[in-house]
């Protein structure tokens, strides 16, 4: 089984190549089989490998496929390394990816560019798998950039709409900012360690750097820059809401389940470096806390169903960063897994709704879908409950509760981070159920055209089940005390101890989290179902309206970057449109041309004027030689 | 043998040369221009002869023979060109032969 490791990323790549080469010639059903099958077989291999992994519990599986290149002692290889952390990631990527692919066959059935879509999707899954399986940072970077490329291709999938192309470029360029920081970080790492092999860096780092050394801080900050760009965290989060321009399965795949969590993976993977730089780790937590609040407030005000989900993704990844930042490594990864399930579910449900309502995404035009689409309603409700962390029954509760608990009680936790997380949970709960109430309750505002088919409902139901039960593998200490997940990650990620003084009262904070979550649901119920006049009253309050507009525009980050970077750049490039430096050489060429025109006048073809020229010249020479 | 003074001979050569030059400048007929060039050549040849006589050296006469030879060659080439021009343009006006101007 171990020897089949290379198959996991290779299969999606093979699928992509087949689809690119023969996409135009194959019939549609075969295209779907290739596109879905490649990821499906990859998921199967992953599950088999995972079962073996769980049975043996080795530290890692390692497979070197070939040596990539060898330059001046730098010999990165195409080698894959699976430990528990990568195992969780490849399971989520292939399995959730497979469900999304399956769903996409139905969702994109009427699409002309069927083959291109699945080629990009497969390429994306393959790149993401390379990213999480890579045993050295260079290969990881290859996957990292591949993911960036595919996000560009897929966000701009409907490229005939200029706005989609703009969104795709925005995503590409903004993530590139982070990638540049990360690349510099990799150069530094190579300079210091002489290798980019992840395991040897992790084992050597404590000898090279003492805790809190500047080198570790610099590298950690640069890596954080890359992670922030890819994961849509403050201050590089602006690309993610616009990335909803792509087809909905793309949003589910890239912007919920996999790509945006690449940053989380990077930080978790390089956990030793971050532990050596407590300042950088604190910054991770602060970035996470700030992002989850900012994105939460923005999600409150959006009307576009997918934009709400996009902001909630940013916010939930903020939670993961918060967890990583306070050192609750396994809690962050646990939340990543749960989030992948319920966010993919929510996006896929949103896709069904959008398709049924003739590509309307505005929630103000939805409503009353509870009766017409019961399957979608129930699965969406489960996903929403998990996102809002409804206590006890949903998986989201267990993962988020753990993060909140360690944000307070962990060694690096403090009250402020906890307060931000708790406030974020409250807001999450409000905007989630605002979405549910606006979409599924109230009067129907748009006619439902076609109900979802089997290919669409099966992934929904599977994901809904996972969103409910996957939380039970990791129960809090004070009841159940099941720690399967953190035990699994134990060899890879450092454990965290809760402070003893608070541990006795853990139940109090759990009740608080539960109350906050339910309170958010109640607030949403109050404003959108029970007494809508409260909302009207709020909308007549000048301050509230201004705040709403500010949040709606994503806290003005777009406008800020527009004024700070885009406009000056456009101004400069307009200025330089005529090549200021080049104008010197153009001037030289112009001058030569001018002389040419002047002198060619003398070539009149009149013989006598030539003679005159000779005579005048002779006279001049004579004069000069006689008198000078 | 009466000898003309050198100054008078050189003056004659100068006058001949100027006549030739002026007629090259003002004539349009290309045959006349050729003839004028011949006159200028002969003026130069006369000046050589005079100079050779003045210093009693054979060089002047040798130079004159050179000039004669060159003039013969020039005339043969020139006449061939003139024939061609006349064939192409049906005229002997030199101003008409400006079709290759820049």
Image (cartoon, grey):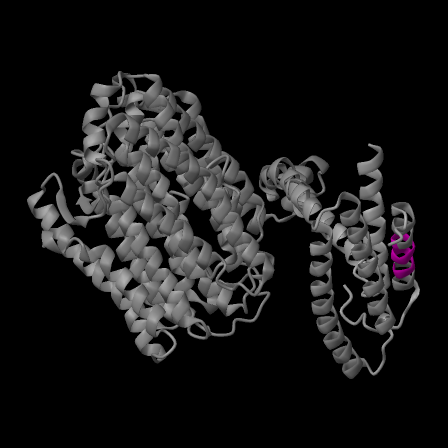
Could you tell me residue A92's position as x and y percent? 28, 51
Could you tell me residue B15's position as x and y percent? 92, 55
Tell me the magenta residue range.
B13-20
- Say whether residue B64 is left or right of residue A199: right
- Say whether residue B56 is left or right of residue A117: right
Considering depth in this image, is A378 or A233 the residue closer to the camera? Answer: A233
| Rendered residue at 38%/35% (across/down) | A182
Considering depth in this image, is A540 or B45 the residue closer to the camera? Answer: B45
Considering depth in this image, is A440 or A161 the residue closer to the camera? Answer: A161
Q: Quadrant of the C terminus of chain A?
A: top right
Looking at the rendering, which quadrant does residue B28 occupy?
bottom right
Q: Is residue A116 visible?
A: yes
Q: Is residue A450 above or below residue A432?
A: below
| Rendered residue at 44%/59% (across/down) | A154
**Which residue, as the protein is rendered here, is positioned at the far left?**
A56
- Say whether residue A466 is left or right of residue B68: left
| Rendered residue at 36%/65% (across/down) | A119
Looking at the rendering, which quadrant does residue B62 occupy?
bottom right
Could you tell me residue B49's position as x and y percent? 78, 53
Count all numbered tags in the image, as a single digit.
Answer: 0
- Say whether residue B64 is left or right of residue A93: right
Whether the magenta-drawn stretch holds residue A604 is answered as no
Q: Is residue A329 above or below residue A248?
A: above
Q: Is residue A464 visible?
A: no
Query: Main SS of the magenta segment?
Result: helix
| Rendered residue at 40%/53% (across/down) | A254
Whether the magenta-drawn stretch holds residue B17 is answered as yes
Looking at the rendering, which quadrant does residue A318 occupy?
top left
Q: Quadrant of the N terminus of chain A?
A: bottom left
């Amino acid at each position: 089984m171990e020897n089949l490791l290379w198959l996991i990323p290779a299969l999606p790549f093979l699928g992509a190549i087949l689809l690119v080469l023969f996409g135009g010639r194959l019939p549609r059903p075969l295209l779907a089989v290739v596109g879905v099958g490649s990821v499906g077989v990859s998921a199967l291999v992953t599950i088999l490998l995972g079962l073996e992994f769980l049975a043996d519990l080795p530290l890692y599986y390692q497979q070197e496929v070939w040596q990539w290149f060898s330059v001046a002692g730098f010999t990165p290889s195409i080698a894959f390394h699976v430990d528990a952390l990568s195992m969780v990631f490849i399971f989520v990527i292939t399995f959730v990816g497979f469900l999304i692919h399956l769903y996409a066959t139905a969702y994109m059935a009427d699409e002309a560019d069927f083959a291109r879509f699945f080629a990009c999707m497969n390429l994306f899954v393959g790149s993401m798998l390379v990213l999480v399986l890579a045993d050295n940072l260079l290969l990881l970077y290859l996957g990292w950039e591949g993911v960036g490329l595919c996000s560009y291709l897929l966000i701009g999938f409907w490229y005939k709409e200029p706005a989609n192309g703009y969104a795709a470029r925005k995503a590409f360029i903004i993530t590139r900012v982070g990638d540049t920081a990360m690349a510099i970080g990799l150069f530094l790492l190579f300079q210091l360690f002489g290798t980019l092999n992840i395991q040897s860096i992790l084992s050597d780092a404590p000898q090279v750097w003492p805790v809190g050394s500047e080198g570790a801080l610099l590298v950690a900050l640069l890596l954080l820059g890359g992670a922030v760009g890819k994961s849509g965290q403050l201050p590089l989060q602006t690309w993610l809401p616009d990335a909803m321009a792509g087809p909905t399965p793309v949003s589910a795949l890239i912007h919920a389940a996999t790509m945006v969590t690449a940053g989380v993976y990077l930080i978790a993977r390089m956990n030793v470096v971050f532990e050596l730089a407590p300042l950088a780790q604190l910054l991770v937590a602060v970035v996470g806390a700030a992002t989850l609040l900012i994105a939460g407030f923005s999600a409150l005000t959006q009307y576009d169903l997918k934009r709400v989900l996009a902001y909630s993704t940013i916010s939930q990844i903020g939670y993961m960063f918060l967890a990583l930042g306070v050192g609750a490594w396994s809690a962050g990864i646990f939340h990543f897994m749960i989030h992948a399930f319920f966010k993919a579910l929510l996006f896929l449900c949103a896709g069904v709704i959008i398709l049924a309502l003739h590509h309307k995404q505005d929630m103000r035009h939805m409503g009353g879908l509870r009766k017409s689409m019961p399957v979608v309603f129930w699965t969406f409700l489960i996903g929403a409950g998990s996102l809002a962390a409804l206590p006890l029954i949903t998986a989201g509760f267990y993962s988020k509760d753990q993060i909140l608990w360690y944000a307070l009680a962990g060694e690096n936790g403090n009250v402020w981070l906890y307060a931000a997380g708790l406030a974020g949970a409250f807001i999450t709960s409000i905007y989630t159920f605002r979405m549910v109430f606006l979409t599924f309750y109230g009067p129907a505002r748009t006619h439902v055209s076609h109900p979802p088919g089997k290919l669409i409902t099966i992934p929904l139901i599977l994901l809904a089940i996972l969103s409910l039960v996957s939380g039970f593998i990791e129960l809090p200490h004070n009841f159940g005390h099941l720690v399967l997940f953190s035990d699994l990650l134990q060899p890879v990620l450092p454990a965290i101890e809760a402070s003893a003084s608070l541990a006795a009262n853990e139940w109090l904070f759990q009740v608080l989290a539960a109350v906050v979550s339910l309170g958010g649901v109640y607030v949403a119920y109050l404003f959108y179902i029970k007494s809508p006049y409260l909302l009207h009253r709020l909308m007549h309050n000048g301050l509230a309206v201004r705040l709403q507009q500010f949040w709606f525009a994503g806290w003005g980050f777009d406008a800020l970057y527009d004024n700070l970077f885009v406009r000056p750049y456009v101004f400069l490039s307009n200025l330089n449109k005529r090549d200021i430096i080049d104008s010197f050489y153009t001037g030289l060429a112009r001058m030569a041309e001018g002389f040419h025109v002047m002198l060619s006048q003398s070539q009149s073809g009149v013989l006598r004027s030539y003679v005159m020229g000779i005579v005048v010249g002779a006279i001049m020479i004579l004069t000069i030689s006689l008198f000078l | 043998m009466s000898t003309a003074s050198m100054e008078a001979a050189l003056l004659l050569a100068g006058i001949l040369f100027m006549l030739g030059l002026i007629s090259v400048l003002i004539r349009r007929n290309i045959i006349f221009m050729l003839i004028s060039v011949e006159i200028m050549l002969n003026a130069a040849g006369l000046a050589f002869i005079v100079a050779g006589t003045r210093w009693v050296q054979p060089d002047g006469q040798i130079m004159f023979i050179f000039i004669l030879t060159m003039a013969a060659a020039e005339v043969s080439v020139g006449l061939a060109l003139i024939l061609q021009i006349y064939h192409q343009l049906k005229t002997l006006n030199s101003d008409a032969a400006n079709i290759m101007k820049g």
